Amino acid sequence: MEKAKIIALKESVLEDNDQDAQALREELRAGGTCLMNLMSSPGSGKTTTLLALNRAFDGRLRWGVMEADIDSAVDADTMLAAGVPSVQLHTGGMCHLDADMTRQGIRALGMEDAELIVLENIGNLVCPAEFDTGAAINMTILSVPEGDDKPAKYPLMYETCDMLVVNKIDTLPIFDFDKEKMESYARARNPEIEIFYISAKTGEGVQALADALVKKVKEWNAR
Amino acid sequence: MSEVRVIQVNESIFAENDRSAELIRKRLTAQGTLFLNFMSSPGSGKTTTLVALINRLKGSLNIGEMDVDIESSLDAQRVADRTGIRSLQIHNGGLCHIDADMTARALLEYDTEGLDLLILENIGNLVCPAEFDTGAHKNVTILSVPEGDDKPLKYPLMYQVSDVVLINKIDALDYFDFDLEKAKERILALNPKAIFFPISAKTGEGIDEVCDWIRKELEAVRSGKL
């Protein structure tokens, strides 16, 4: 099996992350690449969702993935095995990525012709929400076993995100998860947030999410 | 020749934190209170587990609980409603962890005199809380079955600093590809002294065993072994 290249990220020294993120977003748009920042708790199914999306994209997008983790290369190895160009980024214990670290990753991935690059951020609902990575789309995953109260407890994450993917809906019968309560918490923070229900495991709802994403990416790149 | 003054600047903020943590620990040990710090990912069941533990122990132990959240008060309210004990909600204003100074400030607001057990429910986060000693005697981390058995590979520090790992939601084992033995193996590779308790906070399975462990640790604090 092909082993993922591991990139040790250097801590950024730039003072103004927002400015740097804006510059990165513009550079990427000029090059016809849409960057998506994927965030969630640990274990909510980020990698499994990306694998399911890859099947549902069905070759409609040239895309690559940057897997950020504190340690290990399991996620990038998994994506590579599915045929998706991937690099593993190691943050050296850091709890988030900023725009400069993201730029280092994009350079290491080396996909100038990519239409979509996904940054799979560190599994954390707090710190990643505070740092603009230069992404055009911020997506968060909330898995059913985590509970419907997460948008009330980690509000900034839900304010920051354009798309909310509720994963593991195949387990709804065994957990007390109230969809309406969750939606009302999320929309109280962010009335515009687009919500999708999926099971990355069974594939339910994945096609609709993939179609929406393909449309968003093509629109962004045509701007 | 004038004397050159040397200032040591390479001491980290962690050293300062470690000193504050040690003070908290000493004070609680002196008054015979066991202090436990509960950490985990968001949604792994910290509050539900604490409610189950407190309800089982409150007949024989005097228990206090402090709940850290960014801005909501859902958890402290839940603990208070479901157990009847005194619970303090700490809002940390967007921070990703709680350190010893924040704990010390909370303890100014919360009278712990006469408590047998003081519990801190940390922010749901597997990264930052692991870096800060809160002054607790023991760190407990919860890993829930739906999160997957690979978490120790990805968040190693959390498992290195935890004395006890509660593997929660074992009632859902049939629905997820979670290898209990593999999870234990990975945690033991990081921390050979880790103690495990498979539990379901929902059904109550394994909760008695955790309570026994807590009683043993309380004895250790009171006999000067902790």
Image (tube, grey):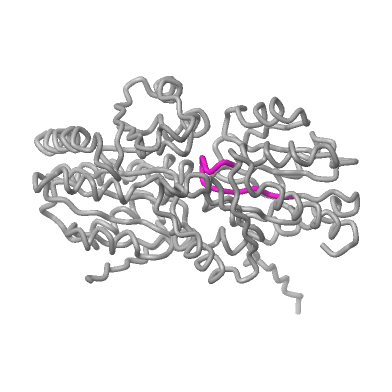
Nearest to the observer: residue A144 or residue B114: A144
**Residue B14's spot in the image, x, y percent?**
65, 59
Nearest to the observer: residue B119 or residue B17: B119
Establish if A58 lies above or below B94. Answer: below
Q: Residue at x 47, y 38 (%)?
A: A146
* Farthest bottom residue in view: B1
Query: In the picture provided, is B57 more to the left or to the right than A189?
Result: right
**Residue A221's spot in the image, x, y percent?**
12, 39
**Residue B6's spot in the image, x, y percent?**
70, 71
**Residue B115's spot in the image, x, y percent?**
86, 42
Read off the magenta span.
Answer: B36-45
Q: Quadrant of residue B60?
A: top right
Identify the image quadrant of the C terminus of chain B. bottom right
Establish if B157 lies above or below B203. Answer: below
Q: Residue at x 78, y 58 (%)?
A: B22
Q: Quadrant of residue A194?
A: top left
